[in-house]
Image (cartoon, helix red, strand yellow):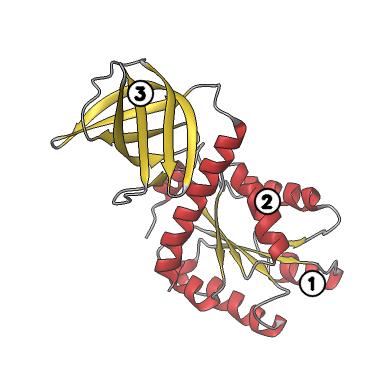
Amino acid sequence: MGSGNETEMTGKKIFFLYPSSLIQNEIAWELIQQEYEVYHVRSHEGLRHALRRFPDSIVFINLDDGLSEKDWDAWIRAVTGDPALGEVKIGVLSAANSDDARKKYAQAMRLPCGYTVVDRADVLKTVKQLYVLLLAVDARGRRKYIRATSENETLTTINIPRNGIYYKGVIKDISVVGLSCAFHEDPDLDKNTLCQDMQIKLQSTILKAEAITFGSRMDGLVKIYVFLFTQRIDPDVRIKIRTYIQSTLQAKMNTLIR
């Protein structure tokens, strides 16, 4: 069960339940680019089970898919009426611009994240409305960047050239601002060493970056280096790192929900 202090530091998980392709590929994607921790779920029972692990999450239901409106209402009441899930914040998304639905979900049921119309003609308008809701429930907390750990992943590696030698390592975790890694052979880098032509492999994606050594620490017998990317990082590289982070977190959540 997540503590309030922990969530304040790390932010809240945002679940889109039965998202349409527009919600998943455009609306949720925009939130991911703004460093929100977003998941797509296609099992209302699986999500209800997972929410016990993350009781301070935010859930946006796509009212147009998954269940009938009557069954959705029953699911919402089951979640909001469960004392263990008292901190879960629910909102409803629909392509229908219905005053009756808005009154029901935002006023009668008093859902903290209300009723949002998915405007197919103006996706950014919908995204901006969600930003306002997420700000009101402090979705991001004090965390600025989403991070993915890649322990035990042999396909997440780093290569840096130094004095004519390439040093290969395994990435421990990564965000758009930097990464930590352990090299097979210590390159003996001082703090603030500039590493140009850094090659990062995130599964099948290979990226080029430039970073500065922020420092190192010992983890048992293993030396862990921390790097911060320089301002010269390509915006496209940031997008690819975010895509990798989201898919890594989503895969872990899928395992839990199954």
Figure quadrant of residue 114: bottom right
Quarter of the image for the N terminus: give it: bottom left
Q: Residues within 10 Å of mark 3 (few under 14, many from 20)?
A: some
Marks 1 and 2 in Cβ contact (< 8 Å): no
Mark 2: amino acid: Leu
Dot 3 or dot 1: first in sequence order is 1
Image coordinates of residue 150 in percent, x first then y, are 36, 48
> Where is residue 87 drawn, in percent x and y?
51, 61
Residue 133: numbered disc? 2
Q: Residue at x 75, y 50 (%)?
A: 129
Question: Which residue sits at x=51%, y=51%?
Answer: 246
Q: Is residue 227 left or right of residue 146?
A: left
Residue 33 visible in the snapshot = yes
Q: Residue furthest left?
A: 221
Which residue was labeled with disc 3?
Answer: 161
Q: Secondary structure at mark 1?
A: helix
Indicate the secondary structure of the residue bearing disc 3: strand
Q: Amino acid at mark 3?
A: Pro
Give how far across and how far down residue 223 sits, in percent: 21, 31
Number of the label disc, if any, that sits on residue 101: 1
Instruction: Point out the residue furthest to the front here.
Output: 164
